[in-house]
Amino acid sequence: MNRMRWLVTGLCIAGATGALWSANWFAGQLYPHSNGGDLAYEPADDMPPRIDMASVQRDWPASLGAPGEGNRLIAYHREMRGKAPLPDAASIPTQAPVDLGTLLARADVTMGKAKIQLCASCHDFTQGGPNRIGPNLWGVVGRPVGGHPGFAYSPAMIADGGGWTYDKLFAFLASPARDMPGTKMAFTGLRRPEDRAALIRYLATLGSGAPPLPKLAQDGASQ
């Protein structure tokens, strides 16, 4: 009798273990798990680099803005570790200095007017219009930084001083938080120089206080 009881107990344990293993295997088929730090494919020696490390370093942090790019970079680095040296800082190609005068001279005002819609949720652009989340931007090109009446600027903006020159707007609109740490402006910025130039060129048409456009490189240094 005892022997039969032990046999039944053993069979029950074996059956339960088999059922748990089968359920775990089936769940793995339905919801496969992959390591975010592993490549889903083997790199081929004749393939061009899937990640331009020089570009990643040069454009950091905007270079990893797309979803999943961070994990992809980690996976690529793990896979390539020991196979090829990371680029030396001296070997990273440097970008040619931006000729703001040429960019602004070639900028499309119509394109800038379209780009301004990115700012319309926080700013008003009409003459005498109200301040909103951000200050009214009529006549912003050439006016003092943090100087529009009635708007509560951040201490960082007030302390900056100076005026909104073409150069200053060009640098600020690339990444407000990076150019002016402490600013309340939450806009992430416009990465492409051509987009910033078009936006600034349109802003310069709002009002009559904008200074002349910077000189072209061939005519002298940009102002």
Image: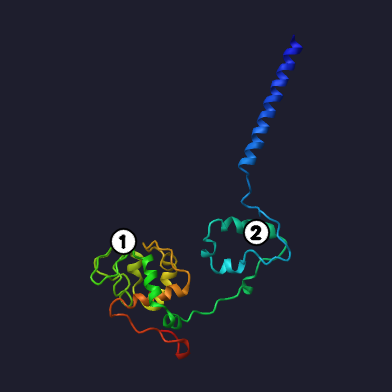
Q: Which mark is residue 76?
A: 2
Q: Secondary structure at mark 2?
A: helix
Q: Position of residue 94 (x, y in %)?
A: 57, 76
Query: Is 128 situated above or below 214?
Result: above
What residue is drawn where x is 36% and y is 65%? 119
Residue shown at the point (72%, 13%) measured from the top left: 5
Q: Decide: is 164 above or below 119.
A: below
Numbered badge on residue 107: none
User: For the residues marked 2 and 1, what is the alpha-carbon distance in whole angstroms?
Assistant: 42 Å
Mark 1 = which residue? Answer: 133
Does residue 135 appear to the left or right of 91 in the view shown? left
Using the image as rendered, state which of residue 97 and residue 197 is in the foreground.
197
- Look at the image and tell me whether residue 103 can be seen: yes
Q: Identify which residue is drawn at 42% across, 80% down.
A: 104
Q: Position of residue 29 (x, y in %)?
A: 64, 41
Callout 2 amino acid: Tyr
| Secondary element at image label 1 | loop
